[in-house]
Amino acid sequence: MEAESNHKYDTTDYTKIDPHFGDKETFAKLVKEAHSLGIRIMVDAVFNHCGPKFAPWQDVLEGCTALLDAIGGAIHHIGNIHKYARPEDVPEHTLFVITTDGMENASRRYSAQQVKEMIQRQKEKYGWEFLFLGANIDAVETAGHLGIAPDRAVNYHCDSEGTRLNYEVVGQAVAAVRCSAPLDEHWKDAIEEDFRKRQKRR
């Protein structure tokens, strides 16, 4: 993990190897040589420490939504985990759930086109499923700009009731995918019904 200090508790990027410890090529070589000797590598990290330049913390301070950076960084990170895992440890199905309560306005690393291409690649090459749940935006339109189909996007109310319903529905979707059941367009019916019902009251 990349950090600025010697003690490395002030993480700036969990997806990068700190230059003091090496780089991706060195790590790949270590993993390859360890595997040749029957040794497995487990990467251990402490995710409750970060530094002032950690991007999500900067978003909190600035009140911004770096949606593209969050999606792109997560796809890259999870893709690397799968890449370096033993074949038997790579999940048969990957369900990538994007939940946001605001419009993109702060990304610095990834553009919408880059994220769209990443999503397309993961869907076509590895069979990943992507769901997009958005509040305070047009979720279907926003998801469409990223290459996510309308039947995989839904608007929700960003309050305790709407968030609770999100967890319930996504939990059911995860259970279905894990059982290799098809995820049809009705996965989001409960969220859409709640959104329409309460939208009329406002």
Image (cartoon, helix red, strand yellow):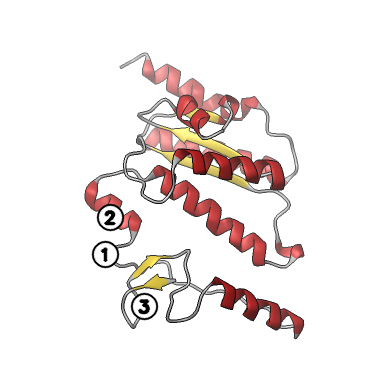
Left or right of 62, for residue 200: right
153 to 88, vertically: above or below: above
- Amino acid type shown at disc 3: Lys
Q: Earlier in the sequence, mark 2 or mark 1?
A: 1
* Near-viewer residue (69 or 198): 69
Type of the residue with mark 2 = Gln
The disc, 2 or 3, on the residue closer to the chain's N-terminal end is 3
Which residue is labeled 2 in the image? 58
Image quadrant in which the C terminus is located: top left
| Residue 108 in view | yes
Closer-to-camera residue (187/144): 144
Q: Which residue was labeled with disc 3? A: 8
Q: Amino acid at mark 1?
A: Pro
Residue receiving disc 1? 52
Name the quadrant of the N terminus.
bottom left
Gap between marks 2 and 3 measured at Cα: 18 Å
In three-dimensional space, the C-alpha distance between marks 2 and 1, rounded to whole angstroms, equals 7 Å
